[in-house]
Amino acid sequence: MKIILLGPPGAGKGTQAAMLVERYGIPQISTGDMLRLAVTAKSPMGVKAKEYMDAGNLVPDEVVVGIVRERLQEDDCAAGFILDGFPRTILQADALNEVLSDLHKQLDAVISLQVEIESLVVRLTGRRSCLNCGKGFHLQYDPPAADGSCTVCGGELMQRDDDCEETIRNRMEVYQQQTAPLEDYYRKQDLLTVVDGMAEIPVVQETIVTALQGC
Ligand code: AP5
Ligand code: MG
């Protein structure tokens, strides 16, 4: 199964992708997570990417396309993958088509999560993730342990640098301008399913799984 999760910042792409990984045994490919690892490692690419990410802008297409091209060739992608946060521009979508064609693969579905803007801000300002295992939480909707630690490994939780309100608003703007046109792009290819992302996390998951039946 080869799928894309599309949706604005905070729509639940990462949350849903992690659950789909468990269910289908295929990897989540999150360009955001990969870039954050590069930033933490202070690699040349990470140093370059950090200024874009801190401002809530997109990292240049050629950087991100290069990362995804390499990742899709790894063995664990043979049976499929879940792209989370990629593609984000028409140029990236065209590049993905080329990469998949080179690998003799085809997308099965594109799921677009729809969530109201003000809910996105609440979700992102309340988001936390485990420094140790990466599990995501929300202070209200998916809370950590009573002492504020990770429910899986007991690790300390952190807040992303780009989850402050000003940067969140810019990320939303960037999404509308550069990424939202991908809905039409994939609708024309008859790959798009729009999913109500306002429902509770398990309900959204079941809607996605139903949409993926037959893929
Ligand atoms: P990225 O990491 O991809 O961030 P994003 O797209 O802004 O999306 P988020 O990760 O913030 O949200 P999400 O949809 O994953 O939501 P989540 O599941 O965590 O990218 C970060 C940056 O990297 C970009 O700004 C850019 O600079 C760069 N970048 C990345 N990819 C790039 C690309 N392809 N090209 C160029 N630059 C790129 O959920 C959010 C919160 O809500 C959580 O707390 C969760 O618990 C909660 N929640 C989830 N679902 C629900 C629900 N149904 N109800 C209630 N709460 C919920
Ligand atoms: Mg995410």
Image (cartoon, grey):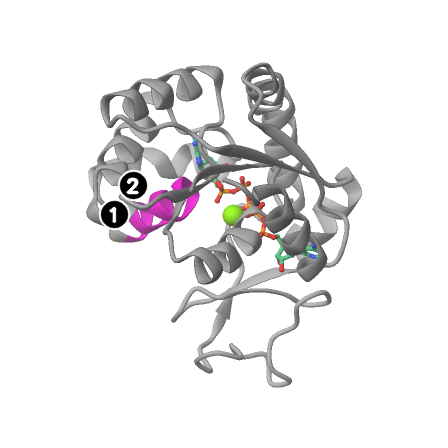
Residues at discs 2 and 1 in contact (Cβ within 8 Å): yes
Crowd class of label 1 (few under 14; some 14 to 19; many from 20; radius 10 Å): some
Where does residue 6 sit, x and y in percent of width and height? Answer: 56, 35
- Magenta-drawn segment: 30-40
Determine whether the residue tagged by mark 1 lies in a helix, strand or loop. loop
- Horizontal relation, residue 63 to residue 141: left or right: left
Give the labeled residue for mark 1: 42
Which residue appears at 37% of the width and 52% of the height? 26
Q: Which mark is residue 145?
A: none
Figure check: 178 above or below 105:
above
Figure check: 67 above or below 96:
below
User: Rounded to the nearest whole Å, what is the CA distance between mark 2 and mark 1?
Assistant: 5 Å
Q: Which mark is residue 46?
A: 2
Where does residue 86 sit, x and y in percent of width and height? Answer: 44, 33
- Horizontal relation, residue 12 to residue 121: left or right: left
Front-most of 149 and 16? Answer: 16
Quadrant of the image containing the N terminus = top left
Q: Residue furthest front?
A: 214
- Horizontal relation, residue 192 to residue 120: left or right: left
Which residue appears at 40% of the width and 16% of the height? 94
* Count of labels in the image: 2
Residue 182 on the magenta segment: no
Q: Residue furthest bottom?
A: 147
